[in-house]
Image (cartoon, rainbow, N blue to C red):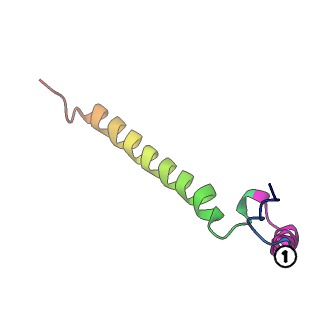
């Protein structure tokens, strides 16, 4: 059995390594869409949950939505 061909050429891999090591951001924010998955989605989930909790507290304090 011969050696398996690499997924990415060695030169391209070195180019990516140089790029990512030169970027002065946190490691988890260095990719193209990493800010969306690391920041955007958690912020959206937090905002949605805070809205729903606030609406529930408002409804409980005013007696809205009770089943008889």
Secondary structure, magenta segment, majority class: helix
> Looking at the image, which residue is at 40% across and 39% down?
53
Left or right relative to 51: residue 40: right
Q: 6 or 40, which lies in front? A: 6
Q: Is residue 22 magenta?
A: yes
Q: 38 or 57, which lies in front? A: 38
> Looking at the image, which residue is at 58% across and 63% down?
36
Mark 1 is surrounded, within 10 Å at the Cα level, by few (under 14), some (14 to 19) or many (20 or more) other residues, namely few
Q: 57 or 19, which lies in front? A: 19
Q: Is residue 34 above or below residue 68?
A: below
> Looking at the image, which residue is at 49% across and 55% down?
44
Q: Is residue 21 magenta?
A: yes
Left or right relative to 5: residue 35: left
Displayed quadrant of residue 31: bottom right
Displayed quadrant of residue 20: bottom right
Image coordinates for residue 59, horizontal then vertical, percent = 28, 37
Q: 24 or 66, which lies in front? A: 24
Image coordinates for residue 13, horizontal then vertical, percent = 82, 70
Q: Residue furthest front?
A: 1
Secondary structure beneath dot 1 equals helix
User: Circle 1 sits on which residue?
Assistant: 15
Residue range of the region highlighted in magenta in the rendering: 12-27
Q: Is residue 28 above or below residue 56?
A: below
* Figure quadrant of the C terminus: top left
Image coordinates for residue 22, horizontal then vertical, percent = 87, 72
Image coordinates for residue 47, horizontal then vertical, percent = 47, 51
């Amino acid at each position: 059995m011969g050696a398996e061909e690499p997924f990415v050429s060695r030169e391209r891999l070195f180019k990516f390594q140089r790029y990512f090591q030169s970027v002065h951001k946190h490691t988890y924010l260095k990719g193209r869409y990493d800010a969306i998955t690391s920041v955007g989605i958690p912020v959206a989930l937090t905002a949605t949950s805070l809205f729903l909790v606030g609406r529930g507290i408002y409804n409980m304090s005013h007696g809205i939505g009770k089943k008889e």
